[in-house]
Image (cartoon, rainbow, N blue to C red):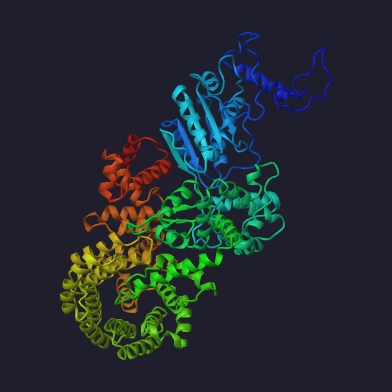
Amino acid sequence: MTCESCGAPLTGRPRNGRPARYCSGACRQRAFRQRSARPDSGRAQTAASPPAQSAARSPRTTAQGCGLPPALDSFVGRRAELSRLRTLLRTSRLLTLTGAGGVGKTRLALEFARSLPGRHGPVDLVELDALSDGVALAPSVATALAVGERAGRSGVDVLVHAIGDTRQLLILDNCEHLAEPCARLIATLLSHCRRLRILATSREALRVPGETVLRVGELSLPPADAGDDPDVLLRADAVRLFVERASSCSPGFTLHRGNGRTVAEICRRLDGLTLAVELAARRAGTLPPSDILAGLGDQMSQLSLLSDGHRTGPGRHSELAAAIDWSHRLLDPAEQAVFRRLAILVGGFDTAAARTVCADEGVAPSRILGILCALEAKSLIARLPGDAAGEAETARFRQLSTIRAYALERLLASGELHSTRRRALVWLNGLTDRAHEEVFPDQAGSPLAVERDNLAAALADTTGHDGVSRPRLELELARVHYEQEQPSAARALLTGLLREHGVRTLGGAVPALAARVACQRADPAQALHLGEQAVAVERTHPHPAGLANALDARAAARLCRGEFDAAVDDLRECLEVVGTLGRPRDTAWCTHHLAWALLQAGGAPEADTLMSRCLPVLRSHAPWNQVAAALHTAGAVRLALGQLESAEALFGEVLQIVPEASFHALYPVEGLALVAAESGDTRRALLLYEASAQARRRLDTVSEAPWRRQVERTVTRISTRLPTSARDAAVSGGRRLSPDRLVAYALRTRSNDHRAATYAAEAADGHLTLTGREFMVAELVAAGLTNRQIAERLGLSIHTVATHLDKVRDKLGLRSRTRIALWVATRTKAGDTPA
């Protein structure tokens, strides 16, 4: 005899002469609730209508979650996702949570279901991971709903009849291996049961008409500059989860300044993947955080460290490798081959890289794009957003570190590691050819900048470099470090190259770049020595482009030393050499450098003439970073000539095209501070300068010496014009401005200075809850514009506008566009709205 509710063996004796039907009072009450929930519970059953089969796995429940699996530990984070789900449930009858294995889809779905009010009706959970095919799908759902077969009805018909017009939420958990059967069942149920809503979890979308897909991302991570302050670190969901789970395994475990950086780095190494963070945290009972981090540093032992999950959890979650293996088994052989070969590309990849590295006799290059799409749909790779500057790029992907560790194990087991590494090196070496086409390669934007981590990983491997120019790869990596203001790393590579006799084929490119790096390291004597060496080498070669680059590098060294006239001489010769090449963009770039040197030498009128000649060419043909540099030079020239409005417009144009959180944005902010100082607006000048100085300290970057001296002299000169209290307020306000608010404040016109000053003061005091862009979106919503119209007005994508609007709703707690419009109107009447 077994319990009619849970199927457990009955050991008790009959009571009152009747055999026992349930093993406990809880099962008896559960069965009563199930009978009461059925539409025919008030009618006597006949022989043609036998008792419904009891639900042995997931009893029905009200939306409050009485019968859902109990939460045995705390739920951390995901507040934005929960809010988004509540919004989507009002408009969509099928929500599918997608994401990588172990990201937390099931837990989010259950937490969401528990939070629903009772008006949403009963909630049923159907766990599908144990099913091997679609044959048992409908019966499993019927069992979860406590619905048995009736005469003349079976399978889907039983479910349609049982659900009918009842308001109900059905959770289908782990649909990925039964995607097609689930899609067919869901489409049938939704078309016949008009008040049914379904919440599915799957590693890929089900592609049912009307489906709304919410990708569950990794937990939030602390910013790189968060330091070791526990209060700051605990704002990140990944850190909070680690601390909570670690404290349950190691009572007394707390986050403090001694272990804060280590815990944060553990979470970053694991990409904020929920299951990975939990498994790592459970090691805190036996290992200190430093040892956990050391274990994660070795990819080959990473998965063995992330094991030993809950004994009572799903088998696929007992170890992270098993969770990933669950997805891997669903791939066809070609998808498995590409999946494991991608492990070589530690820094991410685009379609071209994947095609070169992963295609071979067994996988045709033409199939790579389709396979990448399939891997992304199955949450085994993740698509990265575009660059911060908003330029159009090809799609770029990455594997999460734990998934990549698993893929690397599969690559080793396949015996393809060496051949895959070889293809990766050939691909990287091919990219360096593009750098040799540039006259000024150190300033053109390295084609390998986005591949920095892949390039470093390839150079770290000492095998498989036959036929591949290692010096060229090292030079290109040094260029990337130079462009990203990492002079120490660049210097280490260049020092080794300068010692090698085999780099003669690179001509003066190595000492020229080394001279620029020495300027970046504030070592002008060494910079000039290396610049002289570069020019001497190039004068012995019949390559005008190499000589032009060397002359430009030596001029940069002389500018660092304050030898402005000598720098002008070098750049005039450089311009003559470049002119023979017939390359208008490079001629314009060299002209811009000459204008900058002339400005330092006191020749602002000639510099202005040169800039009017070269700026239109650069605007039309140069990449954004070169356009930004030229606009800054033009602004500085106009500033020196006293043309303040023109200078302000040019500096403002720079801010429109550079990433707001990068060091590129600090030059125009400082330029606008100089304009404000010369215009007599001392408070604005001090606030902009201090904000820029604070950002430079945070980013650990300094500007070129001539510009830095000009800015510092001006600030020193005007700082005594304000009373102490006003000066302190400006300094404090500048230090508190975040990058987006700084840009928003810097771009205000002088006609709006009062409102801009109010905005800056509020930002400094922390009163504003919205960023500048979020407030702009809110204002346009208040003006009655649609998301598409707002996107066109601000030059953003519709998706970005929707994201900003979601943040506005969450921050203000206002769900409708009407209420957002009222909020904007209230602040406008109060006179404290940012312009």
Q: Is residue 418 left or right of residue 588?
A: right
Tell me where residue 727 appears, x and y as whole percent.
Answer: 35, 65
Q: Quadrant of residue 152?
A: top right
Which residue is rendered at x = 47% and y = 87% of the image? Answer: 499
Q: Give the residue at the far front of this rendering.
A: 361
* Quadrant of residue 547 within the rendered picture: bottom left
Would residue 679 be seen by someone viewing this image from the given angle? no
Residue 55 visible at all: yes
Q: Is 809 rendered above or below residue 257?
A: above
Q: How many marks?
A: 0
Relative depth, front residue between 683 and 309: 309
Which quadrant holds residue 110? top right
Residue 435 drawn at (x, y percent): 35, 73
Which quadrant does the N terminus fall into?
Answer: top right
**Which residue does the image show at 45% across and 30% down from the upper left?**
93
Nearest the viewer among 703 and 184 is: 184
